[in-house]
Amino acid sequence: MSTDSSPTDPSSLDCDEALERLFEYLDGELNEDVEKAIEQHLAACARCEPKFEHERVFLQFIAKRAHLEQAPPELRKRLLRELMDAERRRSNE
């Protein structure tokens, strides 16, 4: 689902605005007009395109690694217990 709550004028994105929207763009969270404006900016900007590409590849790497490696079952159980205990303590405060 594409959303966009910022008043950014998609026809006039500069480098700072494009980089500010980097993760929203990579996550597909922008409306179509802003997304197209960023794509146009990236096609023309030698400064921003490598930064977007680096982050895109990095996020793909992280996502792939998250699916390949899982913590052992005992560690997952222990972490879940710790998280539940911490939540109970916060609730009782």
Image (cartoon, rainbow, N blue to C red):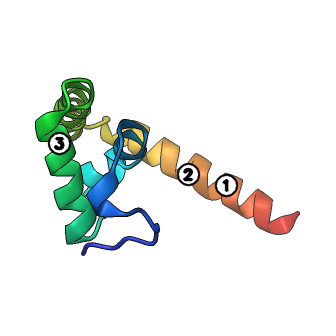
User: Which label sits on residue 67?
Assistant: 3
Give the image location of residue 73, x and y in percent. 32, 42
Identified at 44% across, 47% down, the residue is 77
**Secondary-structure class at tag 1:** helix
Q: Is residue 48 above or below residue 79?
A: above
User: Which amino acid type corresponds to the residue marked 2 in the rendered image?
Assistant: Arg
Q: Residues within 10 Å of mark 2 (few under 14, many from 20)?
A: few
Q: Quadrant of the C terminus?
A: bottom right
Residue 82 as seen in the image, left or right of residue 67: right
Residue 87 as seen in the image, left or right of residue 37: right
Of badges 3 and 1, the one in the foreground is 3
Residue 20 as seen in the image, left or right of residue 91: left
Q: Answer with the quarter of the image where residue 19 lies.
A: top left
Q: What separation in Å lies between label 2 and label 1 (alpha carbons)? A: 6 Å
Front-lying residue, 57 or 35: 35
Give the image location of residue 32, x and y in percent. 20, 70
Residue placed farthest to the left in the image? 43
Q: Residues within 10 Å of mark 1 (few under 14, many from 20)?
A: few
Do tag 2 and tag 1 residues touch (Cβ < 8 Å)? yes
Identified at 78% across, 60% down, the residue is 90
Q: What separation in Å lies between label 3 and label 2 (alpha carbons)? A: 22 Å
User: Which label sits on residue 81?
Assistant: 2
**Secondary-structure class at tag 2:** helix
Q: Is residue 81 above or below residue 72?
A: below
Q: Quadrant of the N terminus?
A: bottom left
